[in-house]
C-alpha cells in the first residue's frame, strides 16, 4: 500500500492550495484518512480527518479555512486550504487506516503514511 501526497508549494498569505493523497496497491478498503502537519521544530499535529462514511473534522486552528474531502471511488483524500497564513507553513503528511485481508481471510488494519509535501506561506 502506498500513499502519494501532492499539491504542496509556496504561496503568499491569503492564498490557497489543494493537497491530494492517493492510495494505491492491494487492499480491502480504507477507513479514516487524515492530514497531519509538522512545522520546523514542532511536533506533528492533526489537521483534519475524513471517515469512509463521510464524517469530517478539522482542527480548530484551521476551521473555517481548510476543508477535507474524499473520493472513495479513487481512494483519494483532498485538503483544500484557503486563507493561508505563515503559521500554516510545514510539511503536510497524509495518513490512512487501510484494511488488508490476510491469507486466512481476516481483515487487519495497517497505518499507512505518505511521504509528505511541503507547504510554505510567506507574509
Image: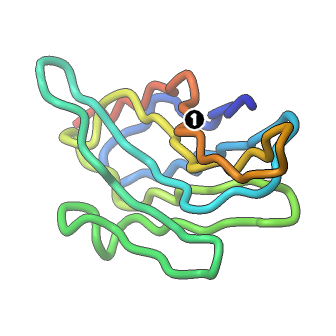
Q: Residue at x 47, y 68 (%)?
A: 67
Other residues around mark 1 within 10 Å, as few (<14) / some (14–19) / many (≥20)? some
Q: Position of residue 7 (x, y in %)?
A: 62, 37
Quarter of the figure with the N terminus: top right
For residue 15, side relative to residue 86 (left or right):
right
Residue appearing at x 62%, y 56% in the figure: 78
Q: Residue at x 50, y 26 (%)?
A: 116
Residue 97 as seen in the image, left or right of residue 44:
right
What's the coloring here? Answer: rainbow
**Front residue (pair 28, 20):** 28
Q: Which residue is mark 1?
A: 112
Q: Nearer the viewer, residue 97 or 100?
A: 100
Residue at the outermost bottom position: 54
Question: Count of labels shown?
Answer: 1
- Towards the viewer: 9 or 101: 101
> Which of these two is toward me, 65 or 107?
107
The residue under the point 57% across, 35% down is 112
**Element type where label 1 sits in the image:** strand
99 relative to 56, above or below: above
Position in image of residue 27 (x %, y %): 82, 44
22 relative position to 65: left or right? right
Identify the residue at the far front of this view: 104
* Horizontal and vertical percent position of residue 8: 54, 33
The image position of residue 26, as x and y in percent, is 87, 38
Which quarter of the figure is the C terminus placed in?
top left
Picture quadrant of residue 32: bottom right
**11 in relation to 74, above or below:** above
| Picture quadrant where residue 22 is located | top right
Amino acid at each position: 500500500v502506498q500513499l502519494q501526497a501532492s499539491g504542496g508549494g509556496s504561496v503568499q498569505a491569503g492564498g490557497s492550495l489543494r493537497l491530494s493523497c492517493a492510495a494505491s496497491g492491494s487492499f480491502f478498503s480504507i477507513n479514516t484518512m487524515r492530514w497531519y502537519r509538522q512545522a520546523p521544530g514542532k511536533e506533528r499535529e492533526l489537521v483534519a480527518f475524513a471517515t469512509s462514511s463521510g464524517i469530517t473534522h478539522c482542527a480548530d486552528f484551521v476551521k473555517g479555512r481548510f476543508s477535507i474531502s474524499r473520493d472513495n471511488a479513487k481512494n483519494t483524500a483532498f485538503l483544500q486550504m484557503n486563507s493561508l497564513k505563515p503559521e500554516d507553513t510545514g510539511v503536510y503528511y497524509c495518513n490512512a487506516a487501510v484494511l488488508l485481508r490476510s491469507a486466512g481471510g481476516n481483515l487487519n488494519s495497517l497505518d499507512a503514511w505518505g511521504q509528505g509535501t511541503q507547504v510554505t506561506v510567506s507574509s
